[in-house]
Image (cartoon, rainbow, N blue to C red):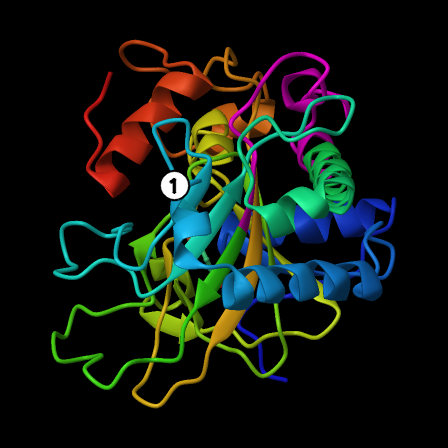
């Protein structure tokens, strides 16, 4: 299938590390085969089965009882999130449920609707798999940038402290008849992701993701096909900050068309522990090739940055 982004198989070779770096630098997006990823296709299927049952069978009142709040956990109704507030008149045509970090003993630290509560052990397990895969990818990045493979580990380990990491179940209902009556209508508006990196699980036959190609790669929106048994990885704003823009936090969106069928996806947003400082990493490659000036102004922490981004997308007031 013609994919604008490379499809890679994880291993410990320098070739793999370099291919991951090249994709992150040139496009900010890559696919990783589930084979060797530590996450099996059947584990992904099981997660989607839970998500589907949750969105289709849970009464709205039960979802609303766990509505999202300033901690970024819980349910968001259709149109409540506006990922591209400057362009979109109507909010995103989607629902989502954000699961924040589970405790080290595997318990949710937020109220859950009954179905998700009954699946707490599995959801916690899947979150751990995502956390491990993110760590593996971060090792490839630090190695490729000339740092120790463990450079990002402590700042991305729940044992170090709480973080804004989220496992997000997404549901895009069948596209309604009036979709597109405003040209800014989107299933998910154009945005970059806020964390370190994102793992995105999609379903065959349910496309919609598009990425804004960097100018060096021709620019313009390109469709990203769903690749079976692979997870899409994209660089978030923080890895871009830390590397002075060397790694790209690429803008993307989810489009819909009249008559479009429902779509499910799951995103794991990997964030560093809240106190992590957003400043350039001590890499020679970043010093030489980073695009932005060195740490200008006040250095934010990961939590300050996340609060600012969430306030903009949900219209929340900054604390
Ligand atoms: O549903 C998708 O395919 C992408 C969702 C996304 O980009 C996000 O939630 O940040
Ligand atoms: Fe995203």
The residue shown at (44%, 84%) is: 261
Q: Which of 15 and 252 is in front in this view?
A: 252
Q: How many numbered discs?
A: 1
The residue shown at (81%, 53%) is: 39
Residue pointed to by mark 1? 67
Residue 201 location, x and y as percent? Answer: 62, 61
Is 148 magenta? The answer is yes
| 94 lies left or right of 46 | left
Q: Let me know if residue 250 appears in the view.
A: no
The residue shown at (38%, 27%) is: 306
| 152 lies left or right of 312 | right
Decide: is 242 above or below 166: above
- Span colored in magenta: 140-168
Q: Let me know if residue 165 appears in the view.
A: yes
Residue 25 location, x and y as percent? Answer: 53, 47
Residue 173 location, x and y as percent? Answer: 41, 73
Which residue occupies the extreme bottom position in the image? Answer: 259
Q: Which of 60 and 170 is in front in this view?
A: 60
Is 253 magenta? The answer is no
**What's the magenta bit mostly, secondary-structure-wise?**
loop
């Amino acid at each position: 299938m013609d994919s604008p982004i490379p499809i890679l198989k994880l291993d410990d070779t320098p070739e793999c590390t370099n291919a991951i770096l090249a994709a992150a630098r040139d496009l900010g997006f890559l696919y990783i085969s589930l084979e060797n990823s530590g996450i099996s296709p059947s584990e992904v299927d099981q997660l989607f089965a839970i998500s589907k049952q949750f969105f289709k069978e849970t009464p709205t009142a039960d979802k609303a009882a766990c509505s999202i709040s300033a901690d970024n956990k819980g349910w968001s109704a259709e149109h409540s999130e506006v990922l591209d507030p400057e362009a979109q008149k109507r909010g995103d045509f989607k629902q989502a449920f954000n699961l924040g970090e589970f405790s080290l003993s595997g318990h949710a630290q937020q109220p859950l609707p009954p179905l998700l509560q009954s699946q707490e052990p599995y959801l916690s397990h899947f979150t751990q798999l995502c956390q491990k895969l993110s760590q593996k990818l971060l090792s490839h990045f630090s190695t490729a940038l000339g740092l120790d493979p463990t450079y990002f580990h402590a700042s991305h380990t729940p044992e170090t402290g709480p973080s804004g990491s989220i496992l997000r179940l997404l549901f895009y209902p069948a596209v309604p008849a009036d979709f597109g009556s405003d040209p800014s209508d989107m299933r998910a508006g154009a945005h970059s992701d806020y964390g370190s990196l994102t793992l995105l699980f999609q379903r065959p036959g349910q496309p919609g993701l598009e990425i804004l190609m960097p100018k060096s790669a021709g620019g313009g929106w390109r469709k990203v096909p769903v690749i079976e048994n692979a997870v899409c990885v994209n660089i978030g704003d923080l890895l871009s900050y830390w590397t002075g823009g060397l790694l790209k936090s690429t803008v993307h969106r989810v489009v819909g068309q009249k008559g479009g069928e429902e779509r499910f996806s799951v995103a794991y947003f990997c964030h560093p522990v809240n106190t992590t400082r957003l400043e350039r990493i001590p890499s020679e490659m970043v010093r030489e090739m980073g695009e932005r000036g060195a740490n200008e102004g006040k250095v934010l922490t990961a939590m300050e940055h996340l609060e600012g981004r969430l306030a903009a997308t949900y219209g929340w007031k900054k604390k």
